Amino acid sequence: MLDIRRISTSRWWHKKKSWVLFGIFVFLVFVRISKGSFYKDIYYFISKPFWPGQFQKEIILKSIDQESLITLNLLKKDNLRLRELLSLQQSSNNENISAAVISRKTGSWWRQIILNKGSKDGVEIGSTVIGPGGLLGRVKNTSLFTSSVTLITSPESKLGVWVDRIQINGLLVGLGDDYPSLILYSKDADLKVGDFVSSSPASSLLPPNIPIGIVESIDKTLKSKKTAKISLFAKPQLIDWVQILKVNI
């Protein structure tokens, strides 16, 4: 009688164990298919009580005043020079989405931030993200409640930029540190420390004339092209609120 009970108990345990393993397998498959968006949405609700308050949000409005003179000057030049010739992206301030930073990896190789706005709020992959000071990056992927932003300091980031003083386009490449690299493919370009860099009017990825930073130092060892380190205006490690630009093409 005792042996029969043991066999019965053993069978029940093995069946339960099989179902548990099957459940774990199905869960892992779900996580793989959803690319982790399920975890991000859970993190959205867990971190909600700790989001930055209204004080940090007001920093965005104050930063607009600080940037307005430079941006207005660039917009006037751009309208005279290219607006009638090129069909470029135009952004509307009325359609910007304000979002809080709920997670950040600004010191790692991947360099990204996670925001508390997702597809339900109208955030789309590829949207431009700015913070107090200027450009931060672009939306890489979204879940229902969150969105992940690849910063311009990430090695994944390659964007067209504009150096206003010398009127030349360049390429801004993230290096995984705090200073992305500006590449000019003209060896004779008169690039100088302190030159202002913004998003290019000819860019197909960004709205034109978003402030980015200034030239920090120039590498003079290369003869075929010019490269420089850029000190960014927007500091992703310090920013709690951002704006997501909804771009009309």
Image (cartoon, rainbow, N blue to C red):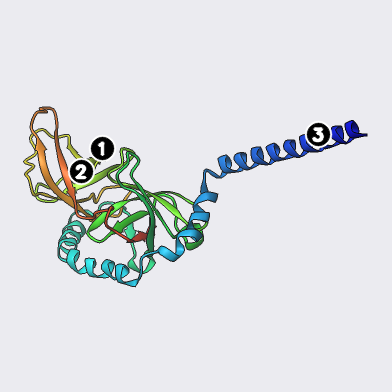
Badge 2 element: loop
Nearest the camera: 237 or 115? 237
Please tell me which of labels 1 and 3 falls first in the chain: 3
For the C terminus, which image quadrant? bottom left
Q: Position of residue 114 (x, y in %)?
A: 40, 53
Q: Is residue 124 left or right of residue 178?
A: right
Nearest the camera: 1 or 178? 1
Name the residue beneath numbered marker 3: 10
Q: Position of residue 245 (x, y in %)?
A: 36, 59
Residue at the spot 90% in from the left edge and 33% down from the top edge: 4
Residue at the spot 18% in from the left edge and 54% down from the top edge: 81
Residue at the spot 93% in from the left edge and 34% down from the top edge: 1
- Amino acid identity at mark 1: Leu
Q: CA distance from mark 1 to mark 3?
A: 57 Å
Evaluate if marks 1 and 2 touch, with contact meaning CB atoms under 8 Å apart: yes
Badge 1 element: loop
Name the residue beneath numbered marker 2: 179
Q: Position of residue 237 (x, y in %)?
A: 28, 53
- Is residue 116 visible to us here? yes
